[in-house]
Image (spheres, grey):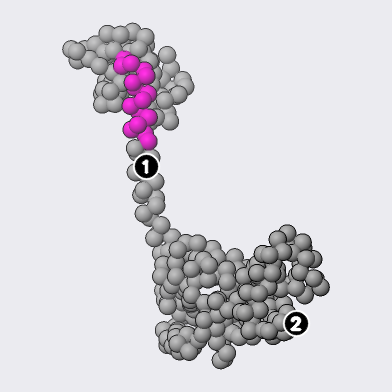
Amino acid sequence: MDAVEGNTLAPLGVSAGEEAVYRTTLRSPGIGIAAIAVECGIDQEAAGAALGRLRDLGMVATADQRTFSGADPASVVDRLTRIRIHGLQGEIRRVASSRHLVESLAEDRRTGRRGQLTELQYVEGLDQVVACVDELSFFSREERLTTHPGPILAAAFDAVRSSDLKYLRRGLRMRTLVHADALESPKVGRFVAELSAQGAQVRGTSGPLERMVVFDRRTALVATDPADITQGALVVRQPGLLSHLLAGFESRWSRSYGVVDDLPSDTELRVLRAMARANKDEAGARELCMSLRTYRGHVAALMRRLGAPNRFRAALAARERNWL
């Protein structure tokens, strides 16, 4: 029999030659080394080496060191499977523990020709900015600081939202400062509420604010145009500039105010819109598929929250807060 003919036990770590010897011992229990060598078409030294490995694996047994018999196939396959699975689990653990190598390699890629990490790097265009944020976020292990100085352009909104939520789902910390001008947009308001629900600390500010993201207090990404993040950004690793950016963020954070509790819930927004469209409570309740009593309860709660004596004034107050 040719030793390389087939190797069905290869997934279990058994070579073609070893499998050929094992099958021979199954077919001819008590067979000797010389006969095994002839049957498998190999020399006696190779047959002896294969038998030694098969004995270590518990695949063959011998009583006198001269004759050999194959062990029960079911037991052999079960044992080999368990050994293989144990080995694969160890390999998976080693691969998982080597993830830090990715960070090391990525740092080398960003290193300049003189072996020093580039302290200032320009990134052009929204796609490159998003890719840079994703890469820096991937290696973040502590906290991300973000700012939103004004309404987020439609072209960038989905990318910003996706990046922030993906980061938060990893269970990492995020502090976000949002300018009062940005909060005038209901879309941004709902985004802020979503960030807060995912664990971010979100606060508002009315002072000057640049658009930036700071990763683990070691790297900052600052928009070249605060009003248009799609134009590009500057990656800052220079310690002096980074220290200045961090000090500015912390100073504004200390003077900021809570914003999430002031935002309307989805139900409140639906009721407000129904109030604006429907002349009668019955029509508003039908539109929202609520009972009349439930609808009126929401209306009364909204009027109290807005400090309005009637529905007309409540609608005005909601518009002043940019809820409608």
- Left or right of 221? Residue 58 is left
- Left or right of 223? Residue 255 is left
| Residue 297 higher or lower than 244, as above or below | above
Q: Is residue 9 magenta?
A: no
* Amino acid type shown at disc 2: Phe
View extreme (left): residue: 64
Q: Earlier in the sequence, mark 1 or mark 2?
A: 1
Q: Tell me what residue is drawn at x 62 percent, y 79 percent.
A: 304
| Residue 83 higher or lower than 58, as above or below | below
The residue wearing badge 2 is 312
Question: Can residue 62 be spotted in the picture?
Answer: yes
User: Which percent across, then down, holds residue 154?
Assistant: 70, 73
User: Which percent across, then down, holds residue 47?
Assistant: 30, 19
User: Which percent across, then down, holds residue 140?
Assistant: 44, 68
Q: Tell me what residue is drawn at x 72 percent, y 64 percent.
A: 292
Residue situated in front as seen by the camera: 164 or 303: 303
Number of callouts: 2
Q: Tell me what residue is drawn at x 22 percent, y 15 percent.
A: 62
* Amino acid type shown at disc 1: Gln
Q: Is residue 74 magenta?
A: yes
**Quadrant of the drawing holding the C terminus:** bottom right
Q: Secondary structure beneath disc 2?
A: helix
By secondary structure, the bulk of the magenta-drawn segment is best described as helix
Separation of residues labelled 1 and 2 (CA atoms): 67 Å
The residue wearing badge 1 is 89
| Stretch of the chain drawn in magenta | 70-85
Question: Can residue 122 be spotted in the picture?
Answer: no
Q: Tell me what residue is drawn at x 48 percent, y 75 percent.
A: 201
Q: Residues within 10 Å of mark 2 (few under 14, many from 20)?
A: few
